[in-house]
Structure formats: C-alpha cells, structure tokens
C-alpha cells in the first residue's frame, strides 16, 4: 500500500439505509467509482508502472482494455513520463475511449471483445519491444487491486463477507489474497454476468462450451476466460462464485442512481445485484460490496431502466 500512497484515493466505505432494509443486513459499499479515473483499475496499473525499470520503460507501454484499465495505464504512464498505446474493443463506450485519450494515451479501437484487442496488442508488443501491462494477469497488477481488500478491513474490521465482480479475475484474486492473509474468516464471493461466466463455469465444475460469444451490459467484465495467474488464486481463496443476469445488473444500476444518486457501470453494479437478488444468504451479516467503477455512458440509462423494469422485485418506501 505504501507505493500507492498519494497516487490513488482511499475510497469511502458507505452505507445505504434502504439497502440495509431490503437485505436485512449491514451492507457497506466500497466506492471505487470515486477512484481517480473512475475505477479500481488505476490501483493495479499504477502499482505495475511504478515498479518498471528504466529499461522496461524505454520503448513505451502497451495495453489492451475494455476501458477502465486503459484509463489507469494512461494516467500512470503519463505521471512517469512514458508513452502508452492502448488497444480497445470497437464498441468501447465513448466516455471510456475519450477519457483514455485525455489521460495521454494513443488508442486503437479494434476487435469485438477484449480478447481480440488483446491479441492485436500482443502482436505489436512482439514487433516493437514495448512493455505490456496486462489488465489482470500480472502479479504487480493483482497486488495493486488487493489494496482494496486491505482498505476495507481497515475501514471496517467486522466484515463477514465481501462481494466482488469477476472479469479476468485481477480484482477478486488480489482482494481474496489480502483478505485471507489478514482475516481468513471473511468469505469472498465472486460475481459474474450470466453472458460472460467462464470463471463461474470452471469454478463450479460445469463443462464449459467454447465461449465464442460473450455478451453482457457489464462491459468491464466482458472477458472470455480467466487468467493463467488469476484463476489458481481464485480456486484457492475465493469461497463461492455466483452469476447475475443483465436485468438484475440493470436493476442494481438504477437502484444506485435513484437511491444513492450515483451512476455506476454494469461491472460496478454486479456485486450489488447479487446481494439484492439474494444469490447468497446475507441476513444479519456485515457485507462488503465493491462498486468497482462508474465509467458509463449516460445515454444508456433508458436501456438500463427498461431492463430493470423486467426484473423488478422490490418496492421502495420512503
């Protein structure tokens, strides 16, 4: 954590009276949507880039990202005076692409998914000799994300369980390592979108069909397969993984907008969706939930509202 002091925000751990009422639990939201660049991804990117030698920085930095990692890499690279070039899927939300450019990176929009963008970035790395900063499958990146878990325990040492979204697994593997090292009794629950659930399928022993098509409104966790480094950590330290539908994610987004006056992205709302829809019993528990990011295009709000209405189960009062 020392390396990141002053470079990233210690984000709030806040409560919602309505959420506590609906879940019959004490829920604490870790607001990484209020992090610099609007996402937890800055932590891992910053930790990695601060650890690079002059030789590793010489030919610049390459990355592939669905958006949030891109912004973290762009900002961290700019702070160290390094050039960065980032490959992003063609359908990356405009807000994420323009913000990445604003932080100083050159961006290349290519491919339908993160995995396709990643392949293009690796091709360039092999030609240019640039240093590749992986979005999740890197020990320094994982360690950076793990600082969220340490902060949560510092902010509330009484937590019983923590929910975290899973894309490639960098966030949950870092958090699980940190939590289990300092308070192993805390349960760590992973959450994936039904339409991009490779880690869930593997973790639960289901036979995984080749995931040619992945689809979810939660573009931040739109990943076809877990990492080679992250998955063994998940398998060893994560207690349970559940899935949520796009309708449930949309409902959680609208809950945050209407009740907390905050617009969070799909990946950021996934853990909250799992809590609201009671995917794991939490009655009477102290529950941590990582709101991983807030980089979402406001023009999508009507879509989220429509999806949310399809799965409305709660009637809010007062």
Image (spheres, rainbow, N blue to C red):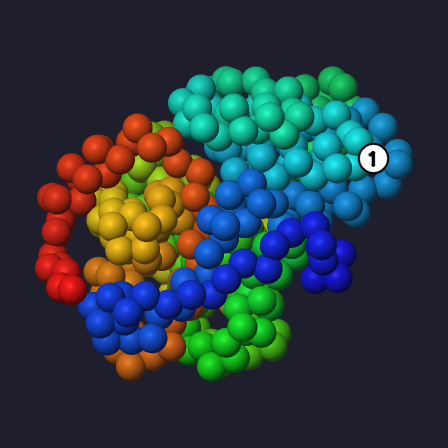
The answer to whether 58 is drawn above or below residue 159 in the figure is above
Give the residue displayed 73% in from the left and 32% down from the top: 78
Point out residue 90 in the picture as x, y percentages from the top left corner. 44, 19
Between 209 and 36, the residue placed more toward the observer is 36
Please give left or right for residue 7 compared with residue 102 in the image.
Answer: right
Give the residue displayed 88% in from the left and 34% down from the top: 55
Point out residue 61 in the picture as x, y percentages from the top left corner. 72, 29
Give the residue displayed 76% in from the left and 19% down from the top: 128
Quarter that holds the N terminus: bottom right
Locate residue 6: give its quadrant: bottom right
Give the residue displayed 64% in from the left and 51% down from the top: 8
Which residue matches tag 1? 56
Point out residue 24 in the picture as x, y percentages from the top left corner. 23, 75
Point out residue 179 in the picture as x, y percentages from the top left corner. 55, 71
- Residue extending furthest toward the front: 318
Locate residue 99: give its quadrant: top right
Residue 116 at least partly seen: no
């Amino acid at each position: 954590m020392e390396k990141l002091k002053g470079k990233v925000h210690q984000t709030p751990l806040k409560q919602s009276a309505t959420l506590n009422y609906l879940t019959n639990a004490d829920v604490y939201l870790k607001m990484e949507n209020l992090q610099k660049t609007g996402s937890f991804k800055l932590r891992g990117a910053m930790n990695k880039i601060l650890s690079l030698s002059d030789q590793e920085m010489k030919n610049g930095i390459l990355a592939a990202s669905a958006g949030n990692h891109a912004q973290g890499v762009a900002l961290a690279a700019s702070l160290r005076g390094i050039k960065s070039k980032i490959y992003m899927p063609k359908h990356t939300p405009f807000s994420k692409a323009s913000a990445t450019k604003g932080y100083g990176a050159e961006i290349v929009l290519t491919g339908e998914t993160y995995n396709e963008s990643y392949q293009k970035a690796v091709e360039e790395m092999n030609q240019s000799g640039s240093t590749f900063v992986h979005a999740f499958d890197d020990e320094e990146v994982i360690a950076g994300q793990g600082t969220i878990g340490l902060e949560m325990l510092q902010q509330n040492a009484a937590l019983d369980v923590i929910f975290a979204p899973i894309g490639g697994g960098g966030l949950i593997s870092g958090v699980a390592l940190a939590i289990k090292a300092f308070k192993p009794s805390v349960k760590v629950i992973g959450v994936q979108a039904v339409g991009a659930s490779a880690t869930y399928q593997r973790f639960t022993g289901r036979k995984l069909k080749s995931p040619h098509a992945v689809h979810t409104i939660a573009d931040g966790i739109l990943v076809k397969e877990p990492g080679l480094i992250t998955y063994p950590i998940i398998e060893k330290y994560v207690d349970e993984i559940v899935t949520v539908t796009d309708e449930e994610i949309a409902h959680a987004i609208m809950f945050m907008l209407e009740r907390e006056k905050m617009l969070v992205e799909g990946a950021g709302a996934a853990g909250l969706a799992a809590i609201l829809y009671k995917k794991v019993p939490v009655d009477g528990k102290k529950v941590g939930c990582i709101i991983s990011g807030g980089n979402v295009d406001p023009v999508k709000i009507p879509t989220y509202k429509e999806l949310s209405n399809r799965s409305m189960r709660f009637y809010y009062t007062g």
